[in-house]
Amino acid sequence: MDNLSLDYLTKKSDLGFERRILYYPEKIIQFGTGVLLKGLPDFIIDHANKNGAFEGKIVMIKSTDTRGSIESLVSQDCLYTVATRGIQDKRLIDKQDICASVSRVLIAKTQWASILSLSKKEEIEFVFSNTTEVGITYEPEKITPGECPNSFPGKVVAFLKSRFEYFNGDLSKGLIFLPAELISNNGDELKRIVFQLAEENYNDLAFLSWLKSANTFCNTLVDRIVPGAANDTLDDKLPYKDKNAIVVEPYALWAIEGDDSIKDKLTFCLPENGAFVAPSIEKYKEIKLRILNAAHTFSSGLAFLSEYKLVKEAMRDEDFYSFMKILMANEISEAMTSEISDSEKNDFAQKVLDRFRNPFLEHQWLSICMNYSYKMATRCLPLIKSYYEQGKEIPELMLLGFTAHIAFLKPVSIIEDKYYGEANGEQYLINDPNADYFYKIWSSEGSNELKIKKILENEELWGENLNNLNRFAEQVYNTFSTITEQGTGKTLSETISKLENA
């Protein structure tokens, strides 16, 4: 079996691959070579190219000075397979596409001159990035002509300075930045740091003015599960060998904040590929944070303590499926106070159910329980408080999810400075920065009721004393006692039965 390559594609007309898309001009430079970029923006560009909507290629930039994982990709002429696997609109999706949006890969430390030469190409219009959350942070540094800066923002400044000088400050030669780093207001934050470094390094008012007037930094929101390499799972589906194949879920979101002028330029944003431009992306952040992230957090400890290791396993259980459906469609949606229509919330909730049911993902509940106390405080507590602010008590499924999280964060032992809980006769790792605090509370003298009240009064954890919420401590303790006496699974089943028969 041949390896995937340009030569292979040109010989295999039966693959339906159009050669024209291999020779589009380079329009994008991309800082980052990770699977999220390959599985979302790069794949979206490939889709737009194949539809004739964009007609441009990506130059990947690897920040480290080793070839590492890129050697295999380069050997395949930067082609790779994307296997889309999961459930969409209640239908099973399992298909493969060859992504041909990347033209080449450059290593920043050793090929900086080649990267700077891209600043002199008129066709370059966009900059993508995913340098992890720490990539968009301020690092004071001296930017020296011809030398590769250490930080990602430093590289951006040097690249833009080269472009400004080559095009003599032409305002039409600015770039549009679309960072995919998973931080809030990523475009604004990148812009702030780039401007700070530019001011510290260049006493050039013309350059600083061009930087501000000609370049656009867009806030974005990305969402797609990209588990990574496909390993050997595609061997029987592909007529070629591909060591760089990746798997993605069908769901894709790339929300970009911009006006109509930005929308007109981002021709790769098509209705069917998940990318779009909107004047504000705040509501998309809110709906993802509450309906997806909060639902994950409310359910993770509950599922794990109910003896489910994987998300897809729990979703096969009728009671747990009902828990997720009612939690999102009723309780979370009702608690959300932002102006998001019911149809938008219901549509998104259905997509989340499809995503959680994906039979191809080995998504572990224990990994979702990482940093559990922080996630509960930031994602879920605002929803709980919303009910109290409306003069209503917390609904039963939120209460059950919150209490299960308290039960999960009950360490019973310390082994090599790591904290472990116990469920169903087995110990599990509690990967939470507050594990030591919970261990001290649970190992102290006193009743469970008193210990729960101590946890709820901790303002460092919650931002306030939760004992001040009417009957909240009482309800949490009563639910905790039920879980302790009869188990999490039975408690869940009885709660769902009660709601469905009400």
Image: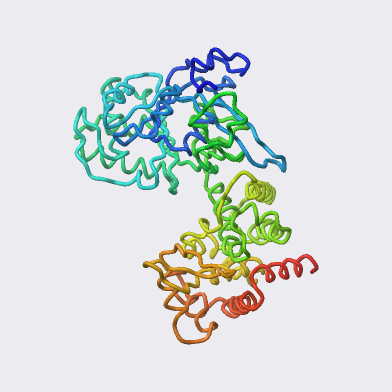
User: Percent from the top left, x then y, of residue 172?
Assistant: 38, 23
- Quadrant location of residue 384? bottom right
Q: Is residue 447 left or right of residue 73?
A: right
* Quadrant housing the N terminus: top right
Q: How many marks?
A: 0
Residue at image position (52%, 78%) is: 452
Nearer to the camera, 328 or 308: 308
Q: Is residue 421 visible?
A: yes
Q: Is residue 59 left or right of residue 49?
A: left
Nearer to the camera, 300 or 255: 300
Residue at image position (59%, 40%) is: 249
123 is higher (above) or lower (below) than 468: above
- Quadrant location of residue 437? bottom left
| Residue that lies at the very extreme toward the bottom in this rendered image | 446
User: Percent from the top left, x then y, of residue 309?
Assistant: 59, 57
User: Percent from the top left, x then y, of residue 127?
Assistant: 40, 31
Q: Is residue 337 visible?
A: no
Its colouring scheme is rainbow
- Quadrant location of residue 52? top right
Nearer to the camera, 25 or 102: 102
439 is higher (above) or lower (below) than 255: below
Residue at image position (55%, 54%) is: 364
* Quadrant housing the C terminus: bottom right
User: Percent from the top left, x then y, of residue 412?
Assistant: 48, 74
128 is higher (above) or lower (below) than 17: below
